[in-house]
Image (cartoon, rainbow, N blue to C red):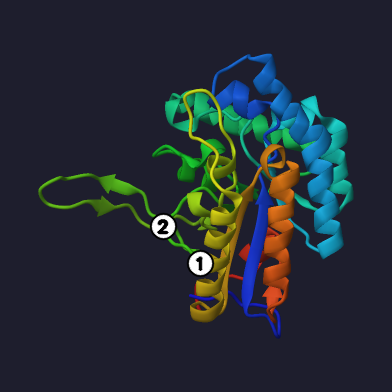
Amino acid sequence: MPLNLPAGKRLALCLSPDFDAQSVWIGTFRTRSQTQLSRGEFGAEVGAPRLLETFRRYGITTTWCVPTHTIQTFPAAVDQVVEAGHEIAAHGVYHEYVPKLEPAEERRLMELQLEQHVKLLGRRPRGYRSPALDITDATLGLLDEYGFEWDSSLMGRDFTPYRPRLVETINLEHGNTFAPPSPVLELPVSWYLDDFPELETYKGGPLMQSNEVLLTRWKESFDFAYERCPGGLMTWTLHPQTIGRAQNLIMLERFLDYVCAHDGIWFPTLSQACDAWSDED
C-alpha cells in the first residue's frame, strides 16, 4: 500500500545515516585496532560534518540511527546533528551484534539504550534500526513492548512499509509458518541501498566496488520506484565514515542532483514516513 504523501509528491526518499563511529569496529567487528578506530573517528570528526553540510545545501532532513556509544564518545558531533534539526533513532548501545545476544542481554541492552537516549538527548527515540541489520526472534516483541513505533532493519519489501511477520516454524518438507504481523511498522532497508558493504574494505572483508557501478545501481533503483511505485518509500543506509570520504560524497551529490531533477520527491525523516502510513489504505 502507498504512503499518504503530501500534495504533489510522488515518492518518498529517506536518507538515514547510521552514525556508528567507533562502535561498529568494537561491537560488530570485535577489534581494538587503532587504525580501525581511527576510521570511526574520521566519521565523527570529518564525515558527519560534511554530510550535514550536504543535507543543508539540498534542504534535506534525515534520521540518524546512533548507538549510544557514539553519543557518549562524540557528543559534540551528535549535538551538531540534533541542532541541524535531524531525528535521532535507536541503533543499539555499542553496535552489538544482536543475533549473538542471549535473551536477557538483548533485553538489558534495549533498556539501557532507551535510558541513555533520555539521559543524554532528553527524549525517547520513536524508531530502531538493528546494528548490522539483523535481529533475533525476540527483537520485534521487545520493540513493541518498549513502545517503538517503527523498525528499519528488515528486507521483506523494497519500496513499501509493512507489518513484519516472524517465521515461526521452519519446515523443510512442508513449508514455513508465520507469526501474526507485528504492531511495529517496518520501514524496509536493503544491502543494495547501503554504502558500507560496497565502499568499505577491511582485512578478510570485501573489496571496494566502483563508485560508478554503485551510482548506476542507485539511479536504476530510483527509476523503477519513481516510475512504477507511486506513493512508495526508498530508504538509504549511509555511514558518515564511508559516504563522508571525498569521492563517495561527490557520488552522493551526483545522485541527489539526479533525484532532485524529478518532480514530486519528498525527503521525510523515518518518523515522518511512519506518520504517513495507514493500514486502512
Give the camera-side residue of 156 and 43. 43
Q: Which residue sits at x=56%, y=36%?
A: 131
Three-letter amino acid code of the residue under disc 2: Gly
Residue 135 placement (x, y as % from top left): 45, 39
In this figure, which residue is indicated by the disc labeled 2?
156
Q: Would you place residue 140 above or below residue 36 in this image?
A: below
Is 241 on the left-hand or right-hand side of 133? right
SS class, disc 2: loop
In this figure, which residue is indicated by the disc labeled 1?
159
Residue 220 placement (x, y as % from top left): 52, 67
Give the camera-side residue of 194 and 74. 194
Q: Which residue sits at x=55%, y=27%?
A: 202
Residue farthest to the bottom?
8
Label 2 Cα neighbours within 10 Å, binned few <14 / some 14-19 / many ≥20: some
Residue 227 is at least partly visible in this image: yes
Residue 119 is at least partly visible in this image: no
Q: Which residue sits at x=71%, y=64%?
A: 256
